[in-house]
Structure formats: C-alpha cells, structure tokens
Amino acid sequence: MLDEPSLVAYLVAGDPSPEASLELASAVLELADVLELGVPFSDPIADGPTIQRGVQRALKAGTRLSHVLDIARALKRERGKPIVLMTYYNPVLRRGVRRFVEDLASAGVDALIVVDLPVDEADELLDSCRESGVGTVFLASPNTPDDRLRLICERSTAFVYLVSLYGTTGAREELSPLALALLERAKRVCSRPLAVGFGVSRPEHVERLVEEGADGVVVGSAFVEIVERLGAGAGPALAEKARELKEAVSRAARARGSAR
C-alpha cells in the first residue's frame, strides 16, 4: 500500500444509506488509490462537523458494523483496491478485538485505524492484526515527539497517518504549515510510508504535499460535503472530485521524479 504517491479518499460508511454508500464509494474508488471507510460512531472526537453530520446520517439510516463489512467486501470484489477501516475503540471492544479483526480480514479490509487507541496500549490489537494479516495505521500529530513518532512508525505496518494540524477533520482554505514541518520531521525518523490528512481538500494542497515527499494524501471532508449536498445522487460529483485530486497527485509525482 502507498508504494507510489496515492490519493486516499475517506467516506463515512452508510452515508446517506448503506445501499447508496456502496454505489458512492465505488464511484470514488474508480479513481482514488485507497479508500478509507469510516465506521459510524455516536461520539467521534477526531472528526469535525462535516464528518459528524455524515456519521449522524449513516446512523439514522440504520447503518451497523455488519453493513460496513458488507460494503467493504463488495468494494473489494468490485474494485480490488486497498481498503482501510477507520473506527474508534468502543466498537472494537464491543465485538471483541480478535473477532473484530478476523471479520475485517474476511471482508477483505487491508488495514485498520483505531483513532483513539494509544499506540503504547495496542498490544492486543497488534497481535490480532498480525495473526489475521490486517495492517495497522497509527496517527502522529504536529506535537508528537520524535521518540513517540519512532514507536508509531514501528507499529504502523501499513503506513503512518500524519495529522496536518491541531484540531479536528474538516476542509480548510489553506494547507497548514504544520503539515510540512511534521512531514519533514517524520521523513527523518520513519521508514514507513507517510500519508497526510486533516484539512487537506484542494488540488493545490495535494500537489504541495506530494512534492514535499508525502506517499499519500487523505481527503475526507471534501468528499463527505458532496454527499451531504447531493445525497444518493452524488456519484458523478464524487468521481469528478476524485479525478481532480488524482490528477494533482500524478502531476506532483511527475515533478518529484524529474527533480531527483
């Protein structure tokens, strides 16, 4: 995963309904390289208002973990591209760590992000992921010290998720300068692929991050905003947004290659 500069698109599973969500995710994944699929959770702490509203729409539509796994399984069969599941720890604990990870593996999920699980308290999850062949992704923020960043790198078997700013998810006008500083520091201390997310929404954001060495860029709220605006008919607009961002990734990758 992220063997070359990649667009990682995020959507809330089940938004606006489990049936429509599969069709919309498939439209995005036609052009995006990786899909990050968010498990709807009633008490998100890392997500801003846009994604929170998407989560509420999904929960109101009756989305359950079984729906999320069905969506992942169908997407894997249809598109064959990497799928990363993003969740909080309560749903994992409720199902049981081992069973949760085994269910992900059987659905074709490639990697798992548990946003609120500290990396140094993740031994049980790491053991289950290792046994089931599911990759792990932990988050580092601008104030993560180098020694902890090294631990996050060691335990993130898929890629390291660099949070570009202080705060929650949500589209911003400008790319945070903290993102570039964190990316530069992470490249010095970490040998894993690095993906940058939070506040990344525009082609110019994507282009700058890839030019500066990001292996992946994660765009979420910009996609969820389209679902909010257009509902079940959002497929064409989502595909157009994915095309625009993917072209930015490709331009930056070419520029980076020619600069070497």
Image: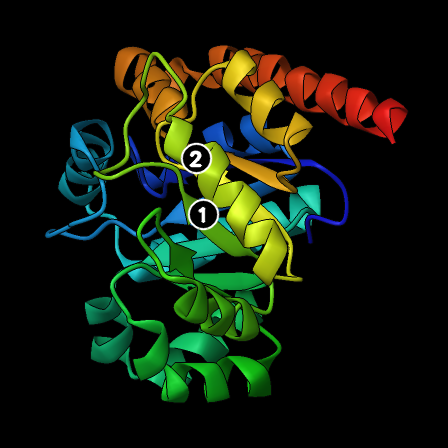
Q: Is residue 147 left or right of residue 42?
A: right
Tell me if label 1 and label 2 are in contact, CB under 8 Å: yes
Q: Position of residue 123 (x, y in %)?
A: 39, 87
Q: Residue at x 64, y 53 (%)?
A: 193
Q: Label 2 crowding class (10 Å Cα cut-off): few <14, some 14-19, many 20+?
A: many
Circle 1 Cα neighbour tier, 10 Å, few/some/many (<14 / 14–19 / ≥20) = many
Task: In the rendered structure, find residue 128 and report the number of the disc placed on it.
Answer: none
Instruction: Say if residue 31 shows up in the picture.
Output: no
Q: Quadrant of the C terminus?
A: top right
- Which residue shows up at 69% across the image and 16% down it? 247
Quadrant in which the N terminus is drawn: bottom right
Classify residue 126 as left or right of residue 66: right
Q: Nearer the viewer, residue 89 or 250?
A: 250
Query: What type is the residue that disc 2 sits on?
Result: Ala
Q: Residue 53, position in %: x, y? A: 16, 31
Report which residue position mark 2 lands on.
179
Query: Tag count in the figure?
Result: 2
Residue name at image x 23 percent, y 32 percent: 54
Q: Earlier in the sequence, mark 1 or mark 2?
A: 1
Q: Amino acid at mark 1?
A: Leu
Q: Of circles 1 and 2, which is in front?
A: 2
Secondary element type, mark 2: helix
Query: Depth check: 5 or 16 in front?
Result: 5
Q: Is residue 232 above or below residue 102?
A: above
Q: Quadrant of residue 210?
A: top right
Q: Give coordinates of residue 50: x percent, y percent.
A: 22, 27
Distance between mark 1 and mark 2 Cα atoms? 8 Å
- Dot 1 corresponds to which residue? 162
Q: Secondary structure at mark 1?
A: strand
Find residue 97 and report its horizontal and vertical position in percent. 34, 83
